[in-house]
Amino acid sequence: MSNKEQIELREEKLKNIINWSENNRDIRAVLLTSSLVNPLAPVDEFSDLDIEFVFDNNADYISSNNWIHNFGNSIAMIEEDETCFDHKHAMKMVLYDDGVKVDFKLYSKANFLAEADQNELPEDWDIGYKVLIDKDSITQKLKQPTYQVSIIKKPTEEKFKQVLNDFWWDTTYVSKCLIRDELFYAKFMSENNIRTDYLVPLIEWYIASQHHWNITTNKYGRLFKKYLTAGMWVKVEKTFSGSDVGDNWDALFAMADLVSEIGTELSQKLGYEYPEKLERDIRNYLNTVKARQ
């Protein structure tokens, strides 16, 4: 199937959802949210439909899944009830056999109005929304989205220092795991903690500092390759490794080199102190541990 055909299937499904909603008396409003209505978000044939239904009473639609088959044959689904979202709404995330994925958010009218009446637009709407149906004019109080939720914010000095300190601290766990041949724990520390919690925000700040703090790289570095130079991207690629212990040591030191480079540059731009002694001492520790292999 071509990219164009997949996009056409998504558009046809959206039309079916709108038509079904217009003829359903239980539904009072329908909104399209997220990437498809956010001018800053990357969109392609794999982008989901994010649909918000507002019901007079959403209870029957939460307890039953029969209605989702009006839009195609589902092959997988994740359900989350209102307790997962502070009793504001429920979710049904559905993958259909035509490859289109739809995330349905199910509001009661009362809860929707309470959200819409807030002084500030909730993040889920501020990132982008489009009103598709409004039978009772209940969306009139919604403020216009700013699309600023995903814009990378300049870190405070405290946050900057914390990320760097935690990065260097957690590299010691990876080194010990590699010496012990504990690959699972090494990967947990390097990929879950170090990459996600420290490396990703540092690269985000690095990119944002080059764009006047007015840019988004989307979730978890989706657009890093777009905004980094070819040379810097090669350095990022070297932080990834497979199952070989030696490759994991190389990736660990590649992470250390990358954090040192971008951390030092950021510290100069932000006017924050870089922990040079901490890096030097931890590098000595890592080299000492590796030498025992």
Image (cartoon, rainbow, N blue to C red):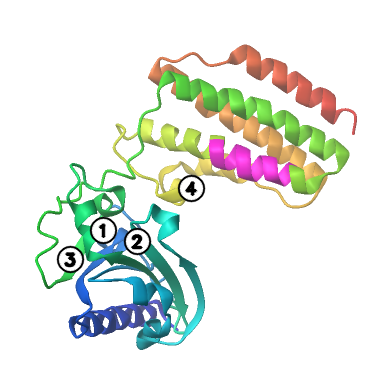
Query: Do residues under tags 1 and 2 come within 8 Å of each other at their CB atoms?
Result: yes
Residue closer to the observer: 8 or 105 = 105
Residue closer to the observer: 235 or 70 = 70
Left or right? Give the position of 116 relative to 180: left
Cα–Cα gap, marks 3 and 4: 28 Å
Tell me the residue at 49%/33% (across/down): 202
Q: Could you tell me which secondary element the residue under label 4 belongs to?
A: helix
Residue closer to the observer: 237 or 99 = 99
Which badge, 2 or 4, is on the more N-terminal residue? 2
Mark sitting on residue 89 = 2
Q: Could you tell me which secondary element the residue under label 3 belongs to?
A: strand
Q: Quadrant of the N terminus?
A: bottom left
Mark sitting on residue 45 = none
Which residue matches tag 3?
Answer: 131
Mark 2 or mark 4, which is nearer to you? 2
Tell me the residue at 10%/69% (across/down): 136
Mark 3 or mark 2, which is nearer to you? 2
What amino acid does circle 2 point to? His
Cα–Cα gap, marks 1 and 2: 7 Å
